[in-house]
Amino acid sequence: MSNTYHLYPCPKVSMAIPAYNEVENIARLISIFLTTEYSNLIEVIVADGGSTDGTQDIVKKLSLEDSRVKLLHNPLKVQSAGLNQILKECTGDIFLRADAHSDYAPDYIERCVEALLESKAFNVGGAQRFVAKTPFQAGVALASKSFLGSGGAKYRDPNYNGYADTVYLGCFWTEELRDTSGFDVSQITNQDAELNQKLLTKNPQAIYISSDIRVWYYPRKTWKSICIQYFKYGRGRYLTSIKHKNQLQLRGKLPFLFISATLLLSLIDFIVPQLSLHTEAFILSGLLFPFGESLRTTFKLRNEFTTELWRGSEDEIPSCLSLWFFCGVTLLTMPIAHFSGYGYQLARHNIFKVNAW
């Protein structure tokens, strides 16, 4: 179906931005897209989830200055619902999603359209490049460069070009997205991966990553927010796994499987001490290993940190000690929080017979 658009050199593009309390970012974000050199950006639609900080006022003001800017109200507040609202209202050939917590290259729209046309995929995007303005964010950004933090995901590799199972954000053919019924509103998180699984059932080469598409993501700023984020990721991953049992890769289940196996061995060791499994040493090693990996990652990227990852002021560059500590804490936190969320949702499904969020 999308092949018909290859006859047109410059498809119409609709920008889709779900937002909630983004007063610090929304004006800058919209302005970036309005000043694009791409000649056929026809609308920038913001689906606001009831912001109370003035976000809606800014969008309304910008809509008076440029008729391409439009505001929709998202009463369900979740991103998937807001994206579906935009999908219903937009008129572009291409549905290009944006996140308010990211920076975009000046040629972001052009490169997305180019990749979509050339790859013949249904959804394209670039790597999720992590950047930071605070010491804790910097630790998360470093963690994303480790295999423990990325899980080997192709969309975390800024040099990867080719087909994959999911991608950061996304640039879609609007008709394909509508034919797939859009985003699953039961997925509070992980809606991107779940949607891409649906697209892959139609075409094994539905998802394409281009290194020419450049976008930079600002991670959560506190340890608590990372815990909540990855707990939700774990819940969403389980919900996706029961919907797409034959497709979901092992990567999304590894934290739950590994920690569950460790806890099971510990229980056996406690009940039958004669086996001498020495699980205490194994658990201690597991708790210390993230900090060893953090040391390796911090040392490896020490010369690239200020140019590739740091977006704060020069006089606030974190010390190597704080980078090592926050990266290690992040690498330890992410799998535990993911495991907890996955296990929580598994219990809701199998014990309490609740299949949704």
Image: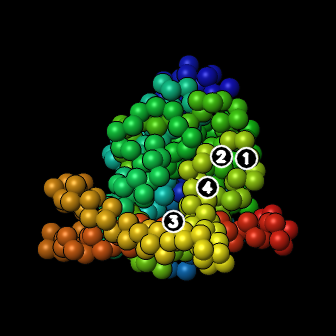
Q: In the image, is residue 343 above or below residue 98? A: below
| The C terminus lies in quadrant | bottom right
Q: Are marks 2 and 1 in contact (CB under 8 Å)?
A: yes
Amino acid type for the residue under numbered disc 2: Leu
| Residue located at (74% from left, 38% from top) | 179
Give the foreground label among 3 and 1.
3
Q: Across the whole image, how many numbered discs are drawn on residues?
A: 4
Q: Disc 2 and disc 3: Cα gap in Å? A: 18 Å
Mark with earlier residue (2, 4): 2
- Residue 253 disc label: 4
- Residue wearing tag 3: 335
Q: Secondary structure at mark 1?
A: loop
> Horizontal placement of 125 versus 181: left or right?
left
Q: Disc 4 and disc 3: Cα gap in Å? A: 10 Å
Q: In the image, is residue 90 above or below residue 219? A: above
Q: Are marks 2 and 3 in contact (CB under 8 Å)?
A: no
Q: Disc 1 and disc 4: Cα gap in Å? A: 13 Å
Q: Disc 3 and disc 1: Cα gap in Å? A: 22 Å
| Residue located at (37% from left, 71% from top) | 288
> Horizontal placement of 288 versus 277: left or right?
left
Query: Where residue 8 sits: x, y (%)?
Result: 53, 23
Mark with earlier residue (2, 3): 2
- Residue wearing tag 1: 244
- Residue wearing tag 2: 248
Q: Secondary structure at mark 2?
A: loop
Q: Residue 94 sits in which quadrant?
A: top right
> Horizontal placement of 221 versus 195: left or right?
left
Pointer 4 local density, CA inside 10 Å: few below 14, some 14–19, many at least 20: some
Amino acid type for the residue under numbered disc 3: Pro
Query: Where residue 339 sits: x, y (%)?
Result: 59, 67
Give the foreground label among 2 and 4.
4
